[in-house]
Image (cartoon, rainbow, N blue to C red):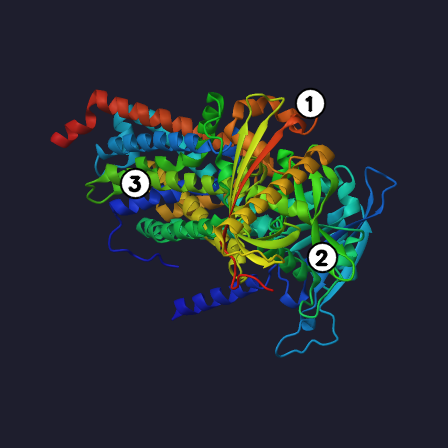
Amino acid sequence: MNPFPYSDEAISENELMFAIPSTIMGVSILSLPRKLALDTLYSDGWISLLLAGVFFAILAVIGTKVASKFPNQSYFSYASTLVTKPVAIGIVIIQIILFIGLSAFSIRSLAYISQQYLFEHTPMEVISLSFLLVVVYAVSGSRAGLFRLNVMFLPIILIVTIIIAVFNITWIDLKNFLPLFKTDMKGYIKGFQTSFEVYIGYSIVLFYVGLVNKPKKLTKKVIVGMSIPIISYIFIFFVTIGIYGNMVTANIELPSLGLAKRVDIPGGIFERIDTIFFTIWTMAIFNTASMLLDVAVLLITSIFKQIKKRIVTFILAPIIYYLVMLPQEIHQVQTASILLSQFMAYFTMVLIVSLFVIASIRGVGKNEKKS
Amino acid sequence: MKKNRNCFLGICSLLLILTGCWDVVNIEDRGFIIGNSIDLVDSANSDQPELLVTNQIVIGSGIPSAANEGGDKKAFINFKTTGKSIYKMEEEIATISNNTPFYEHLTTLIVSEKVAEKERLFTNLLDTYLRNVNLRRGIQVVIAKNEANKVLEYTTPDFPLPAMHIEEMLERGSRETGLLSPTTLGDIEEYQLNNNSYVLPYLELKDVLSYQAGAVFHGPKDKMVGLFNMDDMLALSLFRGEKTTKIIEAPFKDNTFTLQINRLNSTLNVDSSDISAIKINLTLEVEGIIKETFMTEDLSSQKVVESVQDEMSKEISKRIKETFTKAQKEFGTDVFRIWQELETKHYEKWQKIKDNWEEGEYYFKDAQLIVDVVTEIYSIGAINRTR
């Protein structure tokens, strides 16, 4: 198989805008309403969701500002300028491990949920291997191609989600939303923390801004990119609460998938819309998993410049497969994912803020621009 | 050239992998299960009673269609198994049927009255239906008098499938005669998690299968406690303001007349200042058409219509009060969902009384209902009177 040669390997601003929601929205979308309903009362979870979203959008903008001070430089090279090379190597290695772990977790979740809902008798090893092969194929090819896939898939994912919500409108009971604002501060904070897991993909701006071709309105595009997952999450949360109410949402393992199964429209065909939902959800996970893996590959190639991208991908593939099959039970997967994502959220938070502070104090980026 | 050949060989070798599908089941081999019923066989062991589960599987060739007359062939087959775990019994069908049971099209679940009356049993039985990812939450749940499996054998000439017949009947019944809309598995899960009381359709099989009553479930007690008759069901539906057509009879000067209610607007206000005597204010605005009358009054006169409206209002409010008293004093169940009004609008008060609403201190028992009905007749039909 030869990779298709694109005329340009750079990505555009718009492609970055699409890549952000594609990376953020993944596995968590299915269980998010349940987790939030557990932390907060009635329909109050949206507040935590919105606050966390705005918080991470601000971080993403700060990250973009830092990265755009060093145009056409890789993350590793500007991080080395800011915090010295040995420290930068340490940070990058931690990030590589995190991204590989998260990518493996996405694949494992997809395999688990597909086995639950679609292939009862197919071994999980086979499901995850076949999915991993597709992801590896996407990553080993052109990076611009991967970004264009995001641009293609994201609208489909969003449109189908909206269609499912519209079909469910008849089942929404407005009384389920009331009473408003009864959660105590502790509940909101808990929900805020839970929401960390669903936004972690935002840190890709650090790595990809340097690759953007002729950035003009980058900050604006990043904000738009961040608002897509925020709005989608709140929308899905509201629809789930409206239909099931807080108690039931907290009790259903994957409430968003339940929405697709709830659709009941005369005619028969639309009753099976859960299969379509499953397809687009697989596409969403594919985007997430391949973007996360691509970040890991990008970081490795930025340290070891002499190794080819494809070779790195092929070396990573068996490692990821091992990680995918490592946890035995679903509880282990969940614990691992919570640990990984919470650690990643705090790590990236601290990292972006300190990079920004160092860059501002030393004024490195600006000096370089002037000279 | 060489590259092409390698490519070809590669694609051919993929075929070997593609044939190995673990989950292949041909559609002819699937047994589409559309109805389930649960009966109690032996309740000697009260913790784990013996149950009889009936699964209704469709036989495609038995359904009459343009190409296939159907005729004497039955369109369904009922498999019965007994045991203690529902899931195990359902899997056992594979041992007596030549088809793989397929539950995604299950539409109706019929539970025998005896099962529903046993404490906690009904809730426990629903667990398997909710846990199984292949089942839909939109399954309609009904209670049957006596044996539930007999209901799954009742067919009409135009509906060869009993489970489908029940589904249609429930939907039509609620749309056209104002009975409660069908309750689904997902709704029941919500009621049970919240510890709410609720009403399920109650079917009775005599000469025909009829839906004329409702089975009242007590939330905290977690079992069926009694029956609502047709009038109670109508009153409950009026109370909740369900937007369906309703037909109601009322006496007027020794005669009766029948009103078809087309529009209904119900407003509920709860005054919780004194929790030991909660005041419930229900305002109903009813708009309807006179459908039938045995009286000889001049309906074109404003005065007569007004007095008819007053009589109607009195009748509606009397019926609602009767049903409310029945639910309150006899069953002790808040099927009117007054708790929801308290929870959403009087949250702090509700936090104090929520554990003692239908049990313990039993605040619901002392609640007072004030009904205020306004009836408007906007059409008297095509004629004034028959003589």
Residue A280 seen by the camera = yes
Q: Residue A330's image quarter?
A: top right
Name the chain under label 3: A
Residue in front for this viewpoint, A89 or B340: B340
Asked whether, in this view, residue B99 is left or right of residue B368, the answer is right
Decide if residue B31 is on the left or right side of residue A117: right
Which badge, 1 or 2, comes first in the chain's sequence?
Answer: 2
Q: Residue B6: x percent and y percent? A: 44, 66
**Label 1: few (<14), some or many (≥20) within 10 Å?**
few
Which residue occupies 67% across, 39% down? B322
Question: What amino acid does circle 1 point to?
Answer: Glu
Image quadrant holding the N terminus of chain A, namely: bottom left
- Position in image of residue A364 (x %, y %): 20, 26
Residue lying at 70% horizontally and 62% vertically, measured from the top left: B162
Q: Which residue is mark 3?
A: A224
Question: In the image, what residue type sits under mark 2?
Answer: Ser
> Which label belongs to residue B361?
1
Label 2 is found on which chain of the structure? B
With B214 as the anchor, is A257 left or right in this view?
left
In the picture of the structure, the residue carrying the numbered disc 2 is B210
